[in-house]
Image: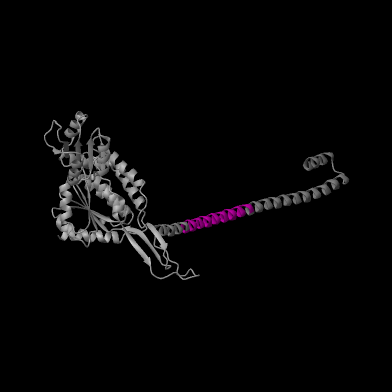
Amino acid sequence: MDKIREILGNATMAYTNMDRNIDGKKVVQNIFEILKESKESVEKANKIDVKNNNGFKINFDMLQKLNNEVNVIEDLYRKVISMNKNGNNYLEGKQTDNLGTICLVYDGNTYCLLELVIKAILTHNSIIITSESDYMKATNELILILIQRILEAYNIDKNLVQLLYTSRIEELLSNSVSINKVFAIGNKSFQDRIRKVSKVQVISKGYNYYDLYIEDLKNLTFIQKIVKEEENIDIYVKSGLKVPFEDYIEVEDIDEAIAQINFNTSGYSSSIFTDNNNNASMFLREVKADNVSVNSSPLIENIVDVDVNLLLTKKNMFYPNPLAEGTGKNKFEFPTAKAILEKNKKREEQLIIEEMQKENFQIKSNSEQVQKQAKMQLEQKEMEVNNLKRQLYESQSLANKYMSIFKKSFFSRIFSGLRKEEIENDTKLLS
């Protein structure tokens, strides 16, 4: 019992401390991504279960099917269903919210586990996955580890999802304070037992159990094939028909068949074989099962389809103080998920603006640095040019000076009677 109390306490803390602004769909998408990346590891774990005759071979196409289903689910957490102002100028409305802790009691089917876990995360609930057997143990425990890894990446308590093997389900379900809703997935007798011991509401879902009503034998070969493929079928045969199998329930007509099926069925999948259109329509309309078909096999994929709304509660909200006339000071809005997202959006926009401002400052700083370097290089070049000009000017001045001195010396020599050889030397030097 101590372990059960610990698990219940962890579940309560996990959903209580979960950030309400977490995008559940993004978390779920990352879970499917890590499952895909870890396909080889999951298959290795699954081979252990199959080898030990303790599970079935997992089909990753089923995981993709569930992923596709989740992608089209609307964000329902804290969604405002209605909001209006009544005749007394009071605000009143209805909004969805999470349940708290839900408990899945099932036979260990991996697809069932994954579907309930995903929908629990989408609705911000914690979930305790409970089984009396260790069926698919290696596969399920590895998948749980991968899911918890994603939760921790989002700073979500990994105990939001917990796995419990126990023979003391009655002790677990007797705690009506910590558990808010129970999902019982299994056959009729299993559902009835869970309903008897649970102190809170139980949602019963059929799984891997089928009903077949035979009203004519036109499709006998096909019916025989169905019966041969699956053991978990309750067969109902119209009185007077001779069928090649013994384990069936004889019924008088369509009315008795529907009554018997609705009383005994697990509610998963039911089929009728008939050439009577009226009876076919009546069967489709009146049978209480998730999947109903005519002249076709009831053996659909072993999955459950849990409505995500079953994991939510709808609360009525009232704002008792009347709105002040002519002023917006007392204006009130329900704390909607949309409002939270808008707030987050503004915060994200502000972060983007701040980031852009930082980038602009850096660009400006870099630009100023480049301009400064260019100016320094330009000044250096100007100094070099001025220095060359100065050197050229000094060279020209010195040349002019020497030229003037030379000219004076040359003409002085001419008039002083220099020899012809000296004049020729001076002329060469001058040139």
Residue furthest left in the image: 246
Write the residue at 27% across / 56% down.
126
Write the residue at 53% across / 57% down.
361
Q: Nearer the viewer, residue 364 or 53?
A: 53
Most common secondary structure along the magenta stretch? helix
Q: In the visual, does 389 lie left or right of 168?
A: right
Q: Quadrant of the C terminus?
A: top right
Q: Nearer the viewer, residue 245 or 127?
A: 245
Write the residue at 30% across / 54% down.
152
Q: Is residue 87 above or below residue 56?
A: below
Q: Would residue 22 be visible to someone looking at this image? A: yes
Give the percent coordinates (x, y) of residue 295.
25, 34
How many numbered tags mark residues here?
0
Q: What residue span does the magenta drawing correspond to? A: 350-378
Give the percent coordinates (x, y) of residue 332.
43, 66
Q: Would residue 209 be visible to someone looking at this image? A: no
Q: In the visual, does 348 lie left or right of 228?
A: right
Q: Is residue 259 magenta?
A: no
Q: Is residue 356 magenta?
A: yes
Q: Is residue 77 above or below residue 279?
A: below
Give the percent coordinates (x, y) of residue 182.
22, 54
Give the percent coordinates (x, y) of residue 176.
20, 61
Q: Nearer the viewer, residue 133 or 30?
A: 133
Write the residue at 22% across / 61% down.
178
Looking at the rendering, which quadrant does residue 33 occupy? top left
Q: Nearer the viewer, residue 201 or 180?
A: 201
